[in-house]
Image: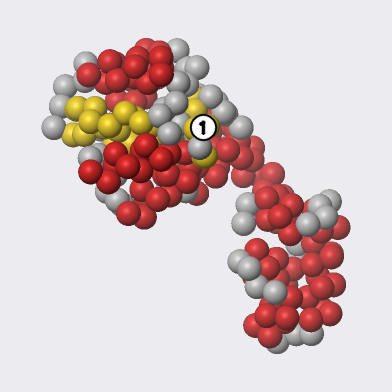
Amino acid sequence: MKRIGIVEDEAEFAQWLKAALAGIEGYECVVVAHSLAQANELLATHPVDVLLVDLGLPDGNGADLILKVFKKYPDTRCCVLSSMDDGEVIFNAFFQGADGFLIKNTEKTVLLEELKTTLEGGFASSAPFHQRVLAFAKKTAQFRALLSEREMEIIQLLARGYSQKEVAATLDVQASTVNSHQKSVYTKLHVNSLAGATKVLSL
């Protein structure tokens, strides 16, 4: 019997999901949490094989829980269930370790079939998923293509928390050179901060 966990703050949807999953032979819903805090508490004593996670939780982003589960319980499969279908949101969820991404307003019979795919070890995704992620990935690739190899090296190190002096020492260049390249990156990407650059480049 495989164990399922649900992390969903909408009580009605969580109840429907639990009831729907109860009809799938070989699976048992052992965790239903409505917040990150509750999920962390329950998962510590009730390990699961598959975790279904909403992103917009009252005390944070469900993607943070997915990353934690991915690191602590690498054999647990995580599937996002969200009303958000933005390409960047989906892209980032997979960077955190998600195994699938389903849109909650998908017709329920279709949604249930996709959930079965996840439970069986497959890759689940709602229809708009591929187009949105591919569009976002292509846009990111286009921005990255604007930068020189040196600019990319520098912005990646800065994104990892290096100071300009530390980047200069690492790459054996002058700090003024690092500063010049950083400004050039901002200009090319039409941003005015490191946070803006890392977001555009998906660093």
The image position of residue 161, as x and y in percent, is 63, 68
The reply to whether residue 91 is in sight is: yes
Looking at the image, residue 100 sits to the left or right of residue 143; the answer is: left
Dot 1: what SS? loop
Q: Nearer the viewer, residue 181 or 20?
A: 20
Give residue 166's position: percent from left, percent from top. 68, 80
- Left or right: 14 in relation to 160: left
User: Residue 132: x, y in percent?
Assistant: 60, 33
**Picture coordinates of residue 38, whole percent (x, y):** 37, 37
Q: Does the image show residue 118? A: no
- Residue visible at 51% across and 32% down? 58
Task: Please give the residue where the numbered disc 1 appears in the rendered image.
Answer: 58
- Where the N terminus falls, by quadrant? top left
Measuring 83% from the left and 55% from the top, which residue is drawn there?
A: 192
Residue positioned 69% across, 44% down in the render: 139
Q: Is residue 186 above or below residue 163?
A: above
Q: How is the image coloured?
A: secondary structure
Q: Is residue 39 above or below residue 103?
A: below
Image quadrant in which the C terminus is located: bottom right
Which class describes the residues within 10 Å of circle 1: few (<14), some (14-19), or many (20+)? few
When the figure is inspected, residue 78 is found, relative to residue 175, above or below; the finding is above
Please identify the quarter of the rendering in which residue 135 is found: top right
Count the numbered circles shown: 1
- Which residue corresponds to the image point at 61% horizontal and 40% vertical from the top-left? 88
Amino acid type at circle 1 is Pro
Residue 27: quarter of image: top left
